[in-house]
Image (spheres, helix red, strand yellow):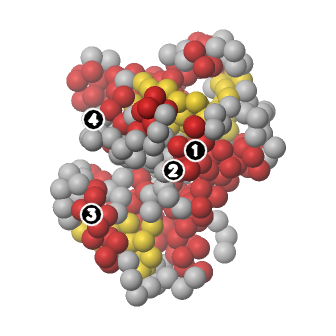
Amino acid sequence: MSQLHLETPYVQSHALGQTLNKNIWLKLDALQPCGSFKARGMAAACQDYLANGATSFVSSSGGNAGLAVAWAGRLLQVPVTVVVPESTKQRAKDLIAAEGANVIVHGESWVEAHGLATEMAQDGAALLHPFESPVTWAGHATMVAEMAQQGPKPDAVVLSVGGGGLLIGVAQGLDQVGWGDVPILAIETEGAASLHGSRMANKHITLDKITTIATTLGAKQVSPTAWELVKSGRAATQLVTDAQAVAACVQFLDDHRILVEPACGAALAAVLNNSDFLADKQTIAVIVCGGAGITLEQLNQWRTEFDV
Ligand SMILES: *Cc1c(COP(=O)(O)O)cnc(C)c1O
């Protein structure tokens, strides 16, 4: 079965390069049809389940993962149910429903929604986890295979981390193309520091709560495989503030005319704010992971709120 995601551009940012006096390359996965890189891994997992006899898909993500499953289900003509918690914004529910998926609102938080989704996953209904799946990681890794065809080998790759699926997929992709020596800088916002907090505590921690507007990065605990990558020194971690992530979204919109979520702005913010980690790196690849949970109105509200 052929892939559902698009090959996205890998372009040099003249604007960022001039500001920072470096070569900044952008992997523009914001341009995927469902608005984020999740198109790669979630669609790959959906196709894998379908090939193994699944007759419907269930997701517990009210964010980009749920939207990607809804989108993939529509293309594959497989019915999709997305169970979301009460806290999920109307716009997210509308986007998922617009893909033809059935949206069920259940429980106060993701834990309850995920519980119901897990119960529903039987008799041919496959449960699509937002980040904990080798098939999903392999799907995300395809972006690095494209980069190796499209542009130069970078001195570092910068990306954002929620549960860690993107990080794991990119690390595997780098190994596959012979770029296993390229360091990875993994970015979270301060209110979603489950990976950075693990590095600080030198153990795999679980956060009590998530306090960031970048809700897409809000996994209380990262995948054990993502923690391994940091523990072994394969990836470094760093935090940015919500305000820095919002400012980066604004600048990215002005520079490149593409609107992205603060979850993606976080990675851009680390580059824009001259992260120490990047000081000795000249060619830097940024994964522009995208995100559909943003409108111009929402960005403007955050600008006001954070005085950006
Ligand atoms: C899912 C997502 C992330 C985080 O990805 P993980 O695999 O959970 O680490 C970051 N940015 C956007 C836009 C996303 O949709």
Badge 3 or badge 2: first in the primary sequence: 3
Check if mark 1's residue and mark 3's residue have beta carbons within 8 Å.
Answer: no
Badge 2 or badge 4: first in the primary sequence: 4
- Residue where numbered disc 4 is placed: 211
- Residue where numbered disc 3 is placed: 113
- In percent of width and height, residue 72 lies at 49, 67
* Gap between marks 4 and 1 measured at Cα: 24 Å
- Residue where numbered disc 1 is placed: 228
Secondary element type, mark 3: helix
Q: Residues within 10 Å of mark 1 (few under 14, many from 20)?
A: some
Badge 4 or badge 1: first in the primary sequence: 4
58, above or below 250, in the image: below
Residue at left 53%, top 57%? 39
Which three-letter amino acid code belongs to the residue tagged 4?
A: Thr
Secondary element type, mark 1: helix
For the C terminus, the quadrant is top left
